[in-house]
Amino acid sequence: MTETLKGNALLQNGTLSKGTAYTAEERKALGLTGLLPPMPASIGMQEEAMMEVYHSFSTPLQKSIFLDALRAANETLFFRMLMDNVDELLPVVYTPTVGDFCKQYSHLLRFPRGMFLSIEDKGHLAEILNNAPQKEVDMIVVTDGERILGLGDLGINGHGIPVGKLVFYTVCAGVDPAKCLGITLDVGTNRERYLKDPLYLGHRHERVRGKEYDEFIEEFFQAVKAKWPNCAIQFEDFANQNAFRLLDRYRNRYACFSDDIQGTAGAVVAGFFSACRAKGTKVSDERIMFLGAGESGTGSSRLLVEAMKEEGLTEEEARSKIWLFDINGPISTRRSDIADYMKPFAKDVDPSLTFEAYVDLVKPTAIVGLSTCGGAFTESIVRKMAAMNDRPIIFALSNPNSHSECSAEQAYEWTDGWALFCSGSPFEPVTYNRKTFVPRQGNNYFIFPGIGLGAILSGCTGIPPEVLLLASHTVADCVTDADLAQGSLFPPSSFMRKISHDIAVNVIRNAQKTGRCARTDIPADLDQYVTDYMYSPEYR
Ligand SMILES: O=C([O-])CC(=O)C(=O)O
Ligand SMILES: [Mg+2]
């Protein structure tokens, strides 16, 4: 049907339109003559013009609103611009600006993308999926909006996150945007502000929990599987109480994974591989404290254990090198309020210690913030880390920047330039004592696009820890000595497509080896198989 679009209908179709780039011959054949200014533009000219407009906006949020509109008008140009200006544009389309966009989503929404499935539609999901904007879907990112970044419950306003994550699938892993679907499950919100906001566009009731919620999720999976049997599903920004349960329930039945439990873990471990290389140590030499014991803190701890086992430690030895601390104190065997997923890491310690007192007691070599608690790594704590360690490892990973446990500048200043630092959201380079540090993001975007790509192309159920570890190695192996010398623990964004490609090959190879491939049509040359699948934004 789409091939036959002509004239104004074609021009107004953002997925297909080339805007001013149609040649005279194309204009004649497609009924476009007279609908455009006479001189055809190249995509390069269009890009130059749009970057000029982009730069005329002063705030990141304004810029992101502009890009959202550009995408609606000409999706190919949007992705071409992103690919040509990754470092500049991705922070505007994704973390941290996507956080601001989400907070006001109901007020800002002009160009709906993806789908909203609400619990009120229970019993009808299969039918509703027939309305999907895409015919074929390979990748779904789904959220219920309960823990968006470090911002908490945003209800349907969190929809910017699945949409933003999928931009990475296209830019970094070459998944055709026409095959990507962002879905928000509206089960209500407990955020007072939205319940009272007359412009809020989600259902205005408290979150549905328990049996009804579980049945809704089950119906969602079954409906998706029936409609798109080969599609992979990424869980994003569910709250702890559901994230672990859902992953455990579905990982062996569907091609699915949790970005926050598994993707973030892959990135954290990659950061440790780099930091240890800079220090001349192994991960198993470190004493690691986590502030935050939720999905990302626990997920990362689990994968660090695997990394230490790979270096020869036993499970128990590895666990003994990791300490967790959450909002209520140390994860202690003396506490009665800790969740099952934290228990393997519980230590026999006084549960009333503050984080700083715990640092005094444990004397860690690394502190990792996944707490959503901005500023939690205080000057006093960071200075203690510097006093105890030649090269203190300080990862401030909560998002967006306002929730970072400390800023890049603080980390370098308080450690006299010795910190091995990364953050979840981007910080500008910092010059301290005449040395310029380039702290790159330790964000799960290094991991999830490749994992998802591999899941699409293999149909594998679940992503085992050994595959995540390979992904961490893939990322860390792209970090050069020159990167380390300037304080970068992660590679530059120019490596993203290669990283995603290589991660995907490993996902597929492992799935074949362990008999978890649902797809039977996989050719022998996996490199070529993945490369051939990867889309680049070009006018068709
Ligand atoms: O979106 C990001 O930048 C990282 C992430 O998954 C989160 O903070 O939940
Ligand atoms: Mg997330």
Image: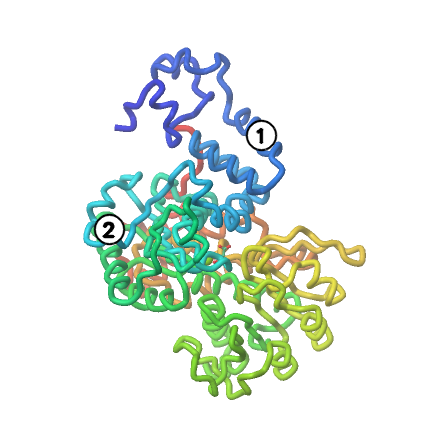
The kind of secondary structure element at disc 2 is: helix
Q: Tell me the residue at 55%/87% (across/down).
A: 350
Compared to residue 151, the image places residue 325 above or below, namely below
How many numbered discs, if any?
A: 2
Q: Type of residue at label 1?
A: Val
The residue labelled by disc 2 is: 121
Residue 504 at least partly seen: no
Number of the label disc, if any, that sits on residue 499 = none
The kind of secondary structure element at disc 1 is: helix
Q: Type of residue at label 2?
A: Asp
Percent position (x, y) of residue 441? Answer: 58, 55
User: Along the line of sight, which residue is nearer the eye, 99 or 519?
Assistant: 99
* In-image side of 184 versus 44 (left or right): left
The residue labelled by disc 1 is: 53
Label 1, residues with CA under 10 Å away: few <14, some 14-19, many ≥20 = few
Q: Tell me the residue at 49%/35% (across/down).
A: 80
* In-image side of 158 versus 357 (left or right): left
Compared to residue 416, the image places residue 493 above or below, namely above
Task: Looking at the image, tell me whether mark 2 or mark 1 is earlier in sequence order.
Answer: 1
Q: Nearer the viewer, mark 2 or mark 1?
A: 2
Colouring rule applied to residues: rainbow
Percent position (x, y) of residue 322? Answer: 53, 78
Residue 150 at least partly seen: yes
User: Along the line of sight, which residue is nearer the eye, 504 or 262?
Assistant: 262
Compared to residue 378, the image places residue 35 above or below, namely above
Percent position (x, y) of residue 19? Answer: 44, 23
- How far apart in space, not on screen, are marks 2 and 1 (Cα)? 41 Å
Percent position (x, y) of residue 126? Answer: 20, 49
Residue sticking out furthest to the right: 434
Query: Which quadrant would residue 71 be assigned to in this image?
Result: top left
